[in-house]
Amino acid sequence: MYKEPIGFYASITWRNHDHMDWMYFSFGEYDEETGLDSYGVNDERVFFYTSPAEIQLLANGQEDWILYPASIEYVYKKEEVNA
């Protein structure tokens, strides 16, 4: 098991919509050759690549969606994502 989280799930809402989604954010890097992030998570499961330091920026609405930091659930094993 990893000592540090490999990513997290969080609730987001899209701008101008009331719909909320539960999405996975990876702390890894995308590997184009394998289609996986650096922790072995399939890119199709990754909504967004980020770092722990960028979470607050994402919550400030710099994207087309808004992240709700209070909803964050950290992930420590790739199996938690690929399930």
Image: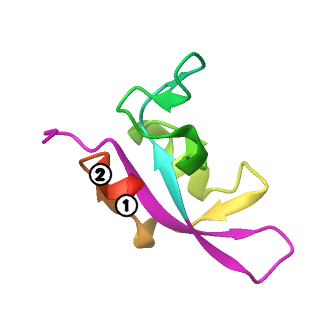
- Discs 2, 1 touching: Cβ within 8 Å: yes
Residue that badge 2 annotates: 79
Category of crowding for the residue at label 2, using alpha-carbon neighbours closer than 10 angstroms: few (below 14), some (14–19), many (at least 20): few
Q: How is the image coloured?
A: rainbow
Does residue 32 appear to the left or right of 39 in the view shown? right
**Residue 77 against residue 49 in the figure, above or below:** below
Q: Is residue 77 left or right of residue 63?
A: left
Q: Amino acid at mark 2?
A: Glu
Q: CA distance from mark 2 to mark 1?
A: 6 Å
- At x 50% / y 55%, what residue is drawn? 24
Q: Which residue is mark 1?
A: 83
Crowd band around label 1 with a 10 angstrom C-alpha radius: few (<14), some (14–19), many (20+):
few
Quadrant that contains the N terminus: top left
Where residue 55 sits: x, y (%)? 48, 48
Q: Nearer the viewer, residue 70 or 40?
A: 40
The x, y position of residue 63, in whole percent, is: 74, 50
Q: Nearest the camera: 12 or 40?
A: 40
SS under mark 1: loop
The residues colored magenta run 1-22
Q: Position of residue 21 (x, y in %)?
A: 62, 72
Q: Residue furthest right?
A: 16
Q: Is residue 48 above or below residue 83?
A: above
Under circle 2, the secondary element is: helix
Residue 80 drawn at (x, y percent): 31, 57
Residue at (31%, 45%) from the top-left corner?
78
Q: Nearer the viewer, residue 70 or 25?
A: 25
- Residue found at the far bottom of this picture: 18
